[in-house]
Image: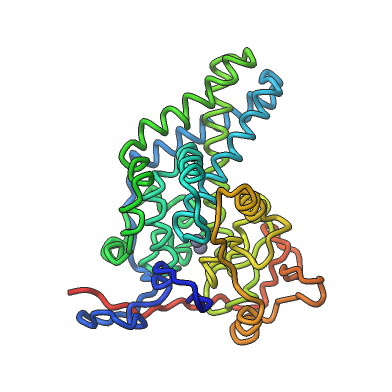
């Protein structure tokens, strides 16, 4: 649950509280303990499985073309740049700006972020935010669309290829999306998402290298569409999988998300995930803005240009209280001169993984509507 600093009014923060903790909540309905029912099997949606297999075959083909030396350097640089655009669109836009309202964006920046997010191909911003708000509210339980307690494959990609748990479908109705429903720009992108995605997510990244770098159409499609797209997808998916498993919990050992510099490195700053779930409304999504948090730097740059404002963050005193009362003891601020990362034995997926602390058994109290 997030501790809001006084003076900050953020209706979304209420979504971090369980149903029972909301002060003016209707108390009708059955009170239920929400965890993970491992006897439940998700139904596989085969057409989507085949789409993901095709995308990955395309991405591997793109990678092999790059390794073969037949792709121009300018095309590869363009693909890398475009993957950066897509990643920031998802993480700075859909995540920090629209899901959590960790900062406010002027209309021009909103339009840019919505266009950037469309290039990521991760559904429209509206759907992205709905799933993400639900993820925070019912983290690591059957109410979470990508419940990490069902294993790394499931929360990384499996959840996209299977039917949702009935409780997840039911609890989706409790997610407050009224702010985004009233946002004309967000709803325009939602209504016209397929067209915008075709233009910005496929046509533009493929057309630029063909037109400007004299690249072949085949190379442009496999490198700048398939490879770039699949790479950006995995970058975001790492946050749902690795950042809920391999790392430390210096801010709250009662929740599943962890701090992982590896995920922060590839995702431009989203791997400080224990902090982020403790304080979802902090624009940095981490205690520190750098290193390995270029998204926070970009938000500050936009603020200095007058495009972003009302950047929210946690004060040190509040943070220290939480570290002392809820942290797993791996916080190393003094040793590391205010660095957050905890150091432990090497782990193949995250060198900051210690493995000393047991994972929490996540259980939430929720009230099911009649
Ligand atoms: Zn998470
Ligand atoms: Zn979040």
**Residue 224 figure quarter:** top right
**In the image as oriented, which residue stretches furthest toward the front?**
306
Quadrant showing the C terminus: bottom left
**Viewer-closest of 187 and 208:** 187
**Residue 70 figure quarter:** top right
**Residue 86 figure quarter:** top right
Place of residue 167 in the rendered image (x, y in percent of width and height, measured from the top left): 29, 66
**Viewer-closest of 153 and 202:** 202
**Viewer-closest of 92 and 304:** 304
Q: Which residue is rendered at x = 28% and y = 61% of the image?
A: 169
Residue 216 drawn above or below residue 172: above
Left/right of residue 161 with respect to residue 218 in the rendered view: left
Q: Which residue is rendered at x = 57% and y = 61% of the image?
A: 311
Place of residue 183 in the rendered image (x, y in percent of width and height, measured from the top left): 35, 50
**Viewer-closest of 177 and 227:** 177
Residue 343 drawn above or below residue 53: below
Q: Which residue is rendered at x = 40% and y = 76% of the image?
A: 17
Place of residue 161 in the rendered image (x, y in percent of width and height, measured from the top left): 38, 48
Left/right of residue 239 with respect to residue 166 in the rendered view: right
Q: Which residue is rendered at x = 73% and y = 71% of the image?
A: 342
Left/right of residue 125 with respect to residue 266 in the rendered view: left
Place of residue 227 in the rendered image (x, y in percent of width and height, measured from the top left): 57, 33
Residue 143 drawn above or below residue 363: above
């Amino acid at each position: 649950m997030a501790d809001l600093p006084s003076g900050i009014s953020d209706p979304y923060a209420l979504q971090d509280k369980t149903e029972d903790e909301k002060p003016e909540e209707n108390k009708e309905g059955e009170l239920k303990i929400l965890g993970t029912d491992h006897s439940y099997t998700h139904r596989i949606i085969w057409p989507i499985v085949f789409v993901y297999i095709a995308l990955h075959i395309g991405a591997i083909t793109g990678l092999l073309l790059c390794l073969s030396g037949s792709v121009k350097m300018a095309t590869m640089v363009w693909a890398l740049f475009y993957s950066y655009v897509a990643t920031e669109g998802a993480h700075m836009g859909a995540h920090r700006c629209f899901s959590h309202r960790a900062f406010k964006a002027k209309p021009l920046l909103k339009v840019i972020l919505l266009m950037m997010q469309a290039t990521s191909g991760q559904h429209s911003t509206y759907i992205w935010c709905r799933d993400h708000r639900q993820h925070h509210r019912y983290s690591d339980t059957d109410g979470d669309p990508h419940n990490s307690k069902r294993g790394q494959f499931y929360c990384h990609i499996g959840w996209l290829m299977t039917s949702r748990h009935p409780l997840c479908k039911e609890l989706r109705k409790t997610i407050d999306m009224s702010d985004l429903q009233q946002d004309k720009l967000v709803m325009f992108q939602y209504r016209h998402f397929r067209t915008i995605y075709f233009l910005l997510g496929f046509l533009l990244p493929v057309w630029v290298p063909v037109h400007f770098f004299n690249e072949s159409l085949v190379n442009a499609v496999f490198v700048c569409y398939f490879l770039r797209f699949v790479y950006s997808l995995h970058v975001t998916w790492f946050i749902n999988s690795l950042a809920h498993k391999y790392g430390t919990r210096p801010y709250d050992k009662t929740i599943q998300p962890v701090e992982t510099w590896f995920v922060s490195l590839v995702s431009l700053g989203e791997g400080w995930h224990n902090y982020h779930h403790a304080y979802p409304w902090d624009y940095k999504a981490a205690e520190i803005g750098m290193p390995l948090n270029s998204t926070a730097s970009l938000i500050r740059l936009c603020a200095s240009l007058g495009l972003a404002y009302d950047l929210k963050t946690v004060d040190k005193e509040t943070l220290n209280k939480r570290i002392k009362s809820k942290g797993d003891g791996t916080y190393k601020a003094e040793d590391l001169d205010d660095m957050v990362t905890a150091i432990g034995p090497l782990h193949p997926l995250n060198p900051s993984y210690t493995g000393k602390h047991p994972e929490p058994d996540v259980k939430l109290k929720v009230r099911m509507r009649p």
